Image (spheres, rainbow, N blue to C red):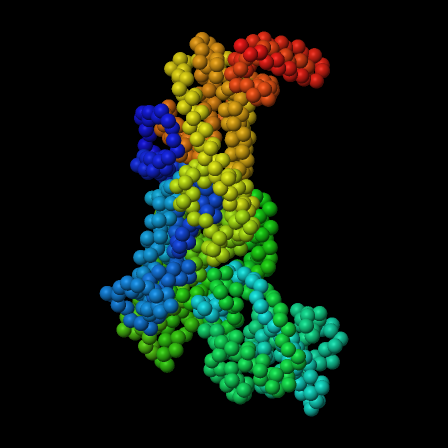
Amino acid sequence: MTQQRSRHAPMPEKPTLDGLEAVWVGRWEAEGTYRFDRSRTRAEIYSIDTPPPTVSGSLHVGHVFSYTHTDTVARYMRMRGREVFYPMGWDDNGLPTERRVQNHFGVRCDPSVPYDPDFRPPAAPDPKRQVPISRRNFIELCQRLTVEDERAFEELWRRLGLSVDWSLTYATIGDAARAASQRAFLRNLARGEAYQAEAPTLWDVTFRTAVAQAELEDREWPGAFHRVGFTPTGGRGPDDRIWIETTRPELLPACVALVAHPDDERYRPLFGTTVRTPLFGVEVPVLAHHLAEPDKGSGIAMICTFGDVTDVTWWRELDLPTRAVVGWDGRLLPEPPAGVPAEPYAELAGKTVHGARERIVQLLRDSGDLEGEPRPVRRAVKFYEKGDRPLEIVTTRQWYIRNGGRDSCLREALLARGGELAWHPPQMKVRYDSWVQGLAGDWLISRQRFFGVPIPVWYPLDDAGEPDRSAPILPPESMLPMDPSTDVPPGYTEDRRGKAGGFIGEVDVMDTWATSSLTPQIAGGWERDRDLYERVFPMDLRPQAHEIIRTWLFSTVVRAHLEQGTLPWRNVAISGWILDPDRKKMSKSVGNVVTPLGLLEQYGSDAVRYWAASGRPGTDTAFDTGQIKIGRRLAIKILNASRFVLGLGGEEAGGRVTEPLDLSMLTRLSEVVREATEAFEAYDYTRALERTERFFWEFCDDYLELVKARAYEEGPAARSAHAALREALDVMLRLFAPFLPFVTEEVWSWWREGSVHRAAWPEPAGPAGDPELLPAVAAVLGRVRKAKSDARLSMRAQVARLTVTGAGAGLLKHAQDDLCGAGVIEEFVLQEDDGEPVVEVELAGPA
């Protein structure tokens, strides 16, 4: 339970922002300010599926940007009386962690190396000469480094002021996460939603792992079109050759057909005939398919297994044979495919794709099968989002989960789920719909990596020692989490591992999204803590960035739909990107990121949070230190204005607000409360901040100046000012609290009990004053100030006469004493009529 402070902190003589973070981070933790109370009912709880950041490197301002957005909502909901379930996870499995470990320790994983319990990484790591170590040693180093990274991340998040309950942390490679991920997989498998298949697979030759559709990105890549001639069978001469244009001539030995559009008159006579491939002389058919593009190149293309994803479609729909030539390492296989002559394939065997391309172009040139010279071109090529080389397509056996890519009924159900979600902002739903409608296949979840959640199956070995993959051995759920490389299946002993009649464990691990897609279940205690799970699931909010709608958001919807038959959350709040000064997305891979620690130290956490909260939901925002500086000035002004208000006294006097100007100010503040509340309920934190900040400056620049003279006096009018000032300060601190948690908590501690972050969100009060009075008086005071400024006089210079005439002038009589005091006015003349308002300022002559 939250502990309440029982006495006020002393108000300092010279308030400062410096050091507030260290003070309040410690106090919040010691007093359990953000500790989740799990005794509350589901209706009283607001649960957040917090994004688990990848702990492979350092956080940058993009993380600060989006996580601040979530925190403002969490703080608002807590002040609205909801008990906020706000955990933090660490996404520490997968390729990014492996790459960091390799570079940090100077090692690489080699499963053939035996485990060394005494292994110590090199004292002087050399990334270019990495030491091979066993899989177990490698995983131990991954775990060691992620613990260090998580500690650094938590320290920075605390400094930023995230109101996370730090007792509710989890890691995607931890026992609870592995058990949940494996349990969900086994249930998917039991229902037929998970399956294994051998099929063409997008493959990263650098990392030697399969890549899912959601992890692809198109990049412009240089290449060249080569005009290559195929010879028709039937004895026709070289002049009858059919010319195709290709950027992948090295795949000629993998060619299985030529294809043209069925309506292309140029090639209709060839459909059903065959041609021979240049250099290799392999006979292949000429076929028709609607995906062929008549206006691209020569209008006829060769189908190879596999040059791109269109080849895969043609291969499948035209029922063509497979002639694989590219290996998992990105080199051409040592032996030619069946039916392809060993010569001249031997010229290509073992070469990289680039090397094979250069050699085959020379062979084609020598044979006369290349017309002209290659024509340079830049084209979109598919890459793994974390890779540096174009993807290849190889045939592998992989695990998949059905996601609607090949099932129209499931696709429609998942589209309907997207329609049930409340999207903030609403236009982001289009991205979800477009992704689901464009799915080309099921979700490939297996990865040929090491540091990840193991796929929990074994395979029996037959008498020849070959695995029977059609009948995997499954563990009971009570055995989870498990690792098939070290654990033994029921009914077997370890000495039968790898032997005929025995078993082997699955060596692949799950894609990191296969675990991250279960974050609501993992954090919520699914099948681990039923009481907690029933109180927080389905969750209320998923906050995330827009570029991973296709991965994290969609995959989480898939898992909850398949397992729980529901959505995983009710609302999704989408953040935009942070852009550099050139309007490019900040990215560690591009090298244009700004790390946040220096900003937090230089400007303070509240100032950085102010900048982040100024970025509208779903909108890309430029990084701007100017905006951070504005946030710092705002925080300093809150300190100074608060000290002025509280320094007037009046808390014990029991004064009531009676003066028209005071009532006008509070009425206007009540409208701000209403607008800020409506904005937060719509997840528009930026509008709530803008409206609050606008009023605060009106309060400081206008109301404080107008009421200052009266506030220093005695009597009912002064007590009215004191009461109004304190009431306004109380409300404004609570309105600012979600955005500027440190400065608001500091000021709150000078005069209020407990924490402002556990105080109730303000409620709009009924209209008590005329909301037009304050701006009307402030406008006249502004004219007085301008007159003095134009005359280069002090603001305390006297005004001999102030005359206000025209429509609405009579309103000013309700605050004429405050106006005269603030403007140092000797004579004030008011005359209301139907004319245009006119303000005349007659300055006093020199003394």
Q: Residue at x 53, y 88 (%)?
A: 343
**Which quadrant is home to the N terminus?**
top left
Q: Nearer the viewer, residue 594 or 427?
A: 594
428 lies above or below 310: above
Q: Residue furthest left?
A: 118
Q: Residue at x 43, y 26 (%)?
A: 640
On the image, which quarter does residue 16 sit in?
Answer: top left
Whole-percent x and y of residue 419? 58, 48
433 and 356: which one is in front? 356
Which residue shows up at 48% across the image and 79% down it?
351
In-front residue for pair 47/461 = 47
Q: Position of residue 60 (x, y in %)?
A: 44, 49
Kindly indicate the quadrant of the structure image that contains residue 263.
bottom right
Q: Give percent across and percent down for residue 12.
A: 35, 26
Between 266 and 63, the one lying in front of the other is: 63
Up-down relation of residue 646 to residue 389 (above or below): above
The percent coordinates of residue 271 (x first, y second) are: 70, 79
Q: Residue furthest bottom?
A: 235
Residue occupying the point 42% across, 59% down: 96
